Image (cartoon, rainbow, N blue to C red):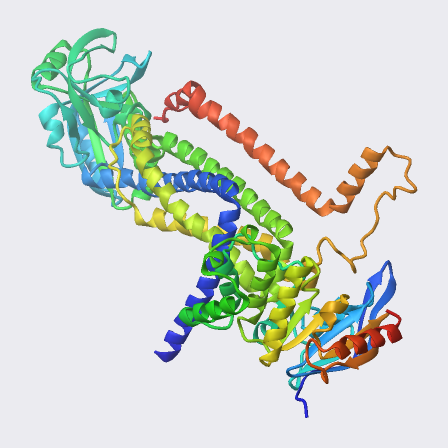
């Protein structure tokens, strides 16, 4: 029996455009489980990122509720959501968003210091994570503009994992990387997931989606279908075949 | 104790985070930080200078007044008429306003002498040196003297700048008679130490005093010095005493001054300078605040994605604003300290200029209250400006900030649609840019308006205070007190 981590009830999100409402998410009922690698797929404009940001407390829903470990987060204030994010969520963005004026180590510590006051413990944790993603000590002292896109994204993952979040949200983490570097980043995410880290990733790339054990397909703000790949180990051809069949069925 | 330690630990953690972000911001904007540093340095230096002038310079007059046990009302009577002295004594003694008084024999006469390409024309109160130094009330002190044994001691105001030096010959007109003396030194007299007091004290050595008395160039007179129980009544008392004497002895020429009159007239230049310095301090501070506010607004606009990233990883708006406050207030406090140091480095020059106007010695010393006020004002107003400019961070939602540039769900108005407009492309694009950033453009307009005002005002000030100060000096020197 899987442990429920996050649940939505009739989650809707609308934006107003010149007085008219544009419904980006429509009555989504979704449950995320601890330890899952959930992938949200869909065409451009389907509402993938909007769903991800609503689930992670980056954005507030127009209607419906989001419950995280029995706590309703949909009515939290901006500050309340900030505290929720720092304690329970990690974020990996397509554009990475490291702070230019800070060294790589400082970028990571700036996230860690929000939760932990023990600087030595934070540095130890950062160094462990840096080692796990293959970022050298020399690179840790560099600035974001001095490292490659792949390195930056791995730093982004370290930053996201600094506070040991319950869920790691990744929005097109390989979208701005070349295939080799992207593969490296996916390997890193897969490895952390295998160690128990829950991951929710948005992608429109099938190769990335194969890393998930649960695939959700979103269309016009509605979850159109779901595919369970957890039965197959990574690298199994059947995983690819089943995903292809699912996506074909969804009209991908 | 435990909760205190918890608070300090929490505060320390919060400061460490803020410092981390503040340091990153400073590294990014070294040029802008340098401009802000220069402005704050100048503003805090002038602010401290003004506070010293305003808070301590005027009280220096009172300190000097107390030290020399100076009178609150001076009455000079150009006569030794029979019964006059007794009448004055009776008049003073029957009024309880007076605490103590003394009546001295002096010589007095209208006269003049050359000074600073012009001439000083005033009523001289001529005293014998030793007698003057021994006065119980209105004591005169020698502030500089040479080894000359025969000559005149002038108020120290005439020895400042391009004035007289010890050993110089001074040619004076006393009444209609020319005399020439060696300048033996300079004196400090609170109530008669400048032409702004309506009478100027001159000390003559005993031989020259007797000689002048024998020649009769200056008639024998009575110098009445009265200390009051309440110095705020000096003007009223001066008028009543003068009135009483005039009624009884209508033919006697009387000359008088009061504490209120002298304390303000001797410090008129100091007050004007303090006013100008304060205006400059506030204007430069205003420029600094405008620059800081623009800097913060610019920072928010330029770093929207970074702010979004910080918020996304869990920073509250308050924590980001706190980082900006730490950054700017930290820089301000350090700069204000340097500015205060600068003001003390500049003060000797300002002091010389002030003494040449007031004629009262002032010893430069460290003053704690102006120091605290300068630091608190600079830190406070900068904190307020940063907070006001940074408040908009609270309105930034992380998702909106991160999507800046992508704007998938930001339905903004399309000003001047190219499909419909007949305007040339460049004009249409310019209009689009202007209208889409209308709020920022209004801010820029207001900023430029304030800056223009400040620049023009500063230019006029610089012209009058530095480039050509003559009209300003003449304005002050020409201002003499009523007698």
Q: Is residue A223 visible?
A: no
- Taking depth in this image into account, of A200 and A245 the one nearest to the observer is A245
Task: Give the residue at x 43% y 24%.
Answer: B466
Which residue is the extreme one toward the bottom? A1
Q: Is residue B233 left or right of residue B324?
A: left
- Taking depth in this image into account, of B324 and B400 the one nearest to the observer is B400
Q: Is residue A118 left or right of residue B147?
A: right
- Taking depth in this image into account, of B443 and A158 the one nearest to the observer is A158
Residue B125: % across, % down: 22, 22
Residue B126: % across, % down: 18, 20
Q: Is residue B127 left or right of residue B110?
A: left
Q: Is residue B429 visible?
A: yes
Q: In the figure, A101 relative to B223: above or below?
A: below
Task: Give the residue at x 66% y 71%.
Answer: A169
Residue A54: % across, % down: 72, 72
Q: In the figure, A241 relative to A182: above or below?
A: below
Image quarter of the C terminus of chain B: top left
């Amino acid at each position: 029996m899987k442990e429920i981590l996050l649940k939505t009830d009739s989650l809707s999100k609308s934006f107003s455009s010149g007085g008219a409402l544009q419904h980006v998410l429509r009555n989504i009922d979704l449950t995320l489980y601890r330890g899952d690698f959930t992938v949200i797929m869909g065409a451009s404009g389907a509402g993938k990122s909007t769903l991800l940001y609503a689930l992670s407390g980056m954005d507030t829903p127009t209607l419906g509720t989001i419950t995280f470990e029995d706590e309703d987060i949909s009515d939290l204030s901006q500050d309340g959501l900030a505290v929720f994010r720092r304690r329970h969520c990690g974020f990996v963005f397509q554009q990475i968003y490291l702070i230019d004026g800070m060294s790589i180590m400082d970028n990571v510590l700036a996230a860690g210091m929000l939760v932990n006051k023990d600087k030595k413990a934070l540095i130890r944790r950062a160094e462990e994570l840096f080692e796990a993603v293959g970022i050298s000590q020399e690179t840790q002292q560099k600035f974001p503009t001095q490292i490659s896109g792949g390195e930056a994204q791995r730093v982004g993952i370290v930053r996201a994992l600094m506070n040991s979040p319950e869920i790691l949200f990744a929005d097109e983490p390989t979208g701005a990387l070349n295939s080799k570097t992207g593969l490296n980043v996916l390997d890193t995410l897969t490895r952390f997931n295998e160690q128990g880290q829950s991951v929710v990733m948005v992608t429109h790339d099938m190769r990335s989606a194969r890393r998930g054990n649960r695939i959700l397909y979103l269309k016009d703000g509605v979850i159109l279908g779901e595919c369970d790949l957890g039965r197959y180990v990574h690298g199994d051809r059947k995983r690819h075949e089943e995903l292809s069949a699912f996506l074909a069925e969804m009209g991908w | 104790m435990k909760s205190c330690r918890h608070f300090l630990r929490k505060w320390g953690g919060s400061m460490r985070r803020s410092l981390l972000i503040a340091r990153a911001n400073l590294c990014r904007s070294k040029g802008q930080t340098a401009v802000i540093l220069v402005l704050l340095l100048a503003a805090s230096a002038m602010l401290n200078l003004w506070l010293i002038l305003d808070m301590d310079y005027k009280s220096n007059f009172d300190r000097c007044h107390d030290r020399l046990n100076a009178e609150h009302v001076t009455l000079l009577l150009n006569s030794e008429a029979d019964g006059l002295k007794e009448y004055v004594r009776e008049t003073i003694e029957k009024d309880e306003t007076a605490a103590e008084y003394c009546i001295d024999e002096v010589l007095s006469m209208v006269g003049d002498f050359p000074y600073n390409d012009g001439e000083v024309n005033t009523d001289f109160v001529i005293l014998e040196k030793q007698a003057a130094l021994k006065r119980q009330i209105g004591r005169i002190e020698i502030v500089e003297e040479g080894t000359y044994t025969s000559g005149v001691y002038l108020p120290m105001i005439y020895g400042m700048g391009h004035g007289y030096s010890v050993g110089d010959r001074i040619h004076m007109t006393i009444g209609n008679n020319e005399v020439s003396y060696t300048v033996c030194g300079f004196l400090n007299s609170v109530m008669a130490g400048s032409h702004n007091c309506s009478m100027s004290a001159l000390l003559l050595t005993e031989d020259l005093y007797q000689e002048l008395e024998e020649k009769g160039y200056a008639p024998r007179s009575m110098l009445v010095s009265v200390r009051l129980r309440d110095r705020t009544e000096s003007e009223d008392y001066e008028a009543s005493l003068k009135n009483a004497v005039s009624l009884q002895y209508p033919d006697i020429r009387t000359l008088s001054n009061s504490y209120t009159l002298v304390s303000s007239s001797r410090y008129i230049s100091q007050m004007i300078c303090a006013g100008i310095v304060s205006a400059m301090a506030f204007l430069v501070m205003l420029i600094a605040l405008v620059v800081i506010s623009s800097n913060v607004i610019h920072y928010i606009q330029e770093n929207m994605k970074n702010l979004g990233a910080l918020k996304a990883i869990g920073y509250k708006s308050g924590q980001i604003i706190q980082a900006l406050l730490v950054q700017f207030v930290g820089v301000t406090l350090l700069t204000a300290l340097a500015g205060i140091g600068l003001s003390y480095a500049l003060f000797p020059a300002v002091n010389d200029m002030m003494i040449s106007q007031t004629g009262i010695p002032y010893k430069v010393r460290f003053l704690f209250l102006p120091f605290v006020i300068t630091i608190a004002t600079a830190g406070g107003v900068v904190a307020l400006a940063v907070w006001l400019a940074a408040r908009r961070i609270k309105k930034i939602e992380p998702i909106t900030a991160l999507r800046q540039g992508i704007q998938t769900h930001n339905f903004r108005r399309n000003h001047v649609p190219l499909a419909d407009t007949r305007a040339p492309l460049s004009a249409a694009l310019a209009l689009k840019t202007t209208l889409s950033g209308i709020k920022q453009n209004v801010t820029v307009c207001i900023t430029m308006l304030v800056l223009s005002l400040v620049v023009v005002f500063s230019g006029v000030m610089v012209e009058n205070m530095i480039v050509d100060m003559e009209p300003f000096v003449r304005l002050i020197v020409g201002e003499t007190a009523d007698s």
